[in-house]
Amino acid sequence: MSSTNNNNNNNKSNINSHPVGRSRSQLPTPKAKKYDRQLRLWGDHGQQAIEQARVLLIGANAVGTETLKNMEDCGSNFFVELARIGEPRAKVCAELLRELNEDVIGDFLEDRLDVLLQRDPGFFTGFSLVIASGVRHSDLLVLSDLLYDRDVPLIVCQQHGMLATCQLVAREHFVWEAHPDNPLPDLRLENPLPEFVAFCDAQDLSAMDSQRHSHTPWLVILYKFLSKWRQANAGKFPSNYAERQAVRQLIRSGERGESDLHGDEENWRQAQSAVTTALLPSKLPSNVNELFKLADQFWLRRQQLSDSSAPSEDRQAAVPPSNWLLLCRTLAEFYRQRGCLPLCGTLPDMVSDSDRYVALLNIYRRAADADLVEFSRLLRVVCLDIGLSADSVPASQIALFCKNARHLRLVKTASYRELSRPLPQTVARCLEETAEAGPSPFWWYLLFHACDRFHTEFGRFPGDTDDVNFLADAGQLKLKCQQLAQDWLASLATTSAAGPTSAPEDLLHELCRFGRAEVHSVAAWMGGVLSQEGIKLITGQFVPETRTMLYDAVSQTFLPVF
């Protein structure tokens, strides 16, 4: 069938690019310049992950091709030429996408999705990421079940005219580098490093001239006055706002006036500001504590399965854990022994002369290296205890894990089958809120699913007809919407308080007016969103959005459905 048929035919394109290299120094100068922006965002290791990724696009429509374009683009753009109309869309798009970046390999397959799922389900599980754009609900259920079981992330997108939704389906996705907006510095001032203490003790603030006094790192200033406060308070570490304010007052008392120097003591003001973030009592982050619990649960389950009393088929199910589980198990042991996480070994920016800043940075780096050595030793023990090779985890991955230990997290979503059928309590709440505040993103989400039911019965989407009276479909769409809402609310004892289950007439007419049209400006915007989320999943950097989101180009809003 023609690849431009959007009823029963789905087009698939995949991209798989050549590796460029492990470090930027190994890149040829032209490529280093070409990927300069990407390298600044996610580093060499992130770029390598992208270059080694295999991405499958199901549905070579406007949103899908915009997504792939953004994932491989280095500043170019493309439009399908009028002269190519009549050719398979997947073929044309794959050719044009390859022209954008010579480092990318692109191919296409013209086949029905439902047929391919039956004939060769293994085809789909060999990809790093699958993006389904404009795919029928019935096919999505089968596809998502397959990918969910194999831990292959899936991004689902649907577009109707000026509206579009996107949804991530991932059983487990580990975020190695969350890149938080305002990370707290890891300075260990509660239990300072011995080498750091010796360095600070050697700094005599009272004997410094104005130039050196105004360029003393705020970290040194903060530690010296913190030590003075602790000596006066039986060695206690500040634990509340009033106590931190007292430390701030001590620092202010040590600042010299303008008449004593020729410059501005910005470093002392930095020390006063840093009191808020650098003197927080250390505690295990909740996201890391959750990872400890997951690792403990996995090890307990694995021990039960490997028990000789368990059935042989269960013992065989005790598969080796993934690298992140091994690392989290080791991290938990490290924390139990040390009472802290591995030091990241970085310092925030500060006003300072170069020699003292570099000296401080080296102190923290040496401590971080020592933590890394100890962590690696514990990891070897963990691996050997379960019969794995001592070097099962690459050294680069261990170092990355330790550096970002405080911000690690595991992202999980329900299966698409569960996500596409919201909990009755959630549906009732959304309907009730809509009755009070007017139409919400939930109504559009409900109508999108009603359109799927309409398509199942009539073989087309509402308004997708040559009949000038396209609004005649609004009645059938309204009926499908009511039926769907009642199905979602079926398990509730009463639905009387849930609010109306009939969509507002203007929303019904709007969807019929769209006729499943693909407005390019909407497709371009959604393509940017999906490519960004896809890169997060491929690189393991930044935290992907797990909520079902709806973009309304009319009101220029991008909001969660629930």
Image: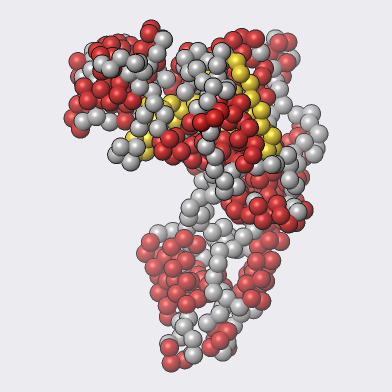
179 relative to 170, above or below: below
Q: Position of residue 45 (x, y in %)?
A: 68, 46
Q: Residue at x 65, y 42 (%)?
A: 101
478 relative to 521, above or below: above
Q: Is residue 153 visible?
A: no
Direction from residue 85 to residue 119 in the image, left or right: right
Q: Quadrant of residue 454?
A: top left
Towards the viewer: 544 or 215: 544
Q: Is residue 466 visible?
A: yes
Q: Quadrant of residue 554?
A: top left
Q: Residue at x 36, y 29 (%)?
A: 161
Direction from residue 238 to residue 298 in the image, left or right: right
Towards the viewer: 436 or 324: 436
Towards the viewer: 214 or 106: 106
Quadrant containing the N terminus is top right
Q: Position of residue 37 (x, y in %)?
A: 59, 53
Q: Quadrant of residue 304?
A: top right
Q: Position of residue 268 (x, y in %)?
A: 48, 76
Residue sitting at the far top: 457
Q: Residue at x 73, y 45 (%)?
A: 20
